[in-house]
Image (cartoon, grey):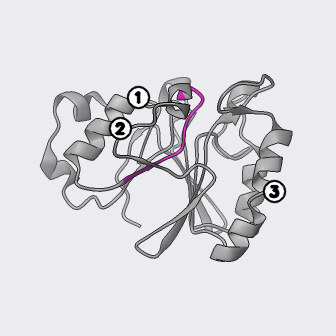
Amino acid sequence: MVSDEESKYIWEHFDPERFRGVELIISCGDLSADYLGFLVSMIPAPLFYVPGNHDKSFADHPPAGCDSIDGKIIVFKGKRFFGLGGCKSNKEDTFEYTEAEMARIVSKKKLLFLRHGGFDILVTHAPAQGIGDGNDSFHQGFEAFLKLGEQYKPSYHFFGHQHTSYGRTQTKIVRGPTTYINACGYHILDI
C-alpha cells in the first residue's frame, strides 16, 4: 500500500525482486498519477485507489491503468475492499468534506453494504477520528469512519493523509478486530 509520499527508493532504485509476489497495490491518496502509473507498469498487479485532497486532477484525468474504489466495493481474491477518498475540511472543494457531508456519503452506501454483506478492508484517505489522526482540524479523522469500523468490523483500515514527517511514527494501531495502518510512503503487507 502507498500514500502521500513518493518513495525515492521505488522511483530511482526500483528493484523488481523487492516486489515479487505483490498481488495488489492500494493507494490511499495524494500521489501523482505518474507515480501510480509507474507502479502499475512495474509491478504486475492491479492498483486500487482512493483520491486524496491533493488529487483534484483525478476528477478529470484519473491515473492510467488504475481503478478507483471511491464509493465502491471491489472484491479481490475473496476480500471486499470499500473505499472513500478525501479529507475533512470546512470549505467546499474537490475531495474535501465536512463531517456532515461524509456522514451523508456513508449513509447513502448502506444498500451497497447490505448487498455485499459489509466489507473486509476499508481504504480511505483520511483516518478515523481519534485513530492516527492529527490535532489540527484539517488533519482530524472522520467520525463517520470510526462508526463504519464499529459497525462493520473490517479486518483492516488503510488510510493516508498523515505524513510521517508530521511526527506520526506509529503506523499500525490495533483496536478490537481492526488493524489501522497509515500507508504513508509504502508498506508491503501479507493479508
The main secondary structure of the magenta stretch is loop
Q: Foreground: 79 or 66?
A: 66
In the rendered image, residue 49, in percent from the top left (x then y), is placed at 48, 46
Near mark 3 (Cα within 10 A), the count class, few <14, some 14-19 or many ≥20, is few
Give the distance between the C-alpha atoms of the residues marked 2 and 1, in whole angstroms: 6 Å
Q: Residue furthest right?
A: 100
**Magenta part of the protein: which range?**
47-55
Amino acid residing under circle 3: Ser
Q: Is residue 51 magenta?
A: yes
Q: Secondary structure at mark 1?
A: loop
Give the distance between the C-alpha atoms of the residues marked 3 and 1, in whole angstroms: 30 Å
User: Circle 1 sits on which residue?
Assistant: 32
User: Circle 3 sits on which residue?
Assistant: 107
Position above or below: 103 against 30: below
In the rendered image, residue 103, in percent from the top left (x then y), is placed at 82, 48
Residue 115 in sight from this viewpoint: yes
Q: Foreground: 161 or 172?
A: 161
Near mark 1 (Cα within 10 A), the count class, few <14, some 14-19 or many ≥20, is some
Q: Foreground: 184 or 90?
A: 90
Residue 136 in sight from this viewpoint: no
Horizontal relation, residue 103 to residue 160: left or right:
right
User: Circle 2 sits on which residue?
Assistant: 36
Kindly identify the residue that appears in the image at 68 percent across and 31 percent down.
134
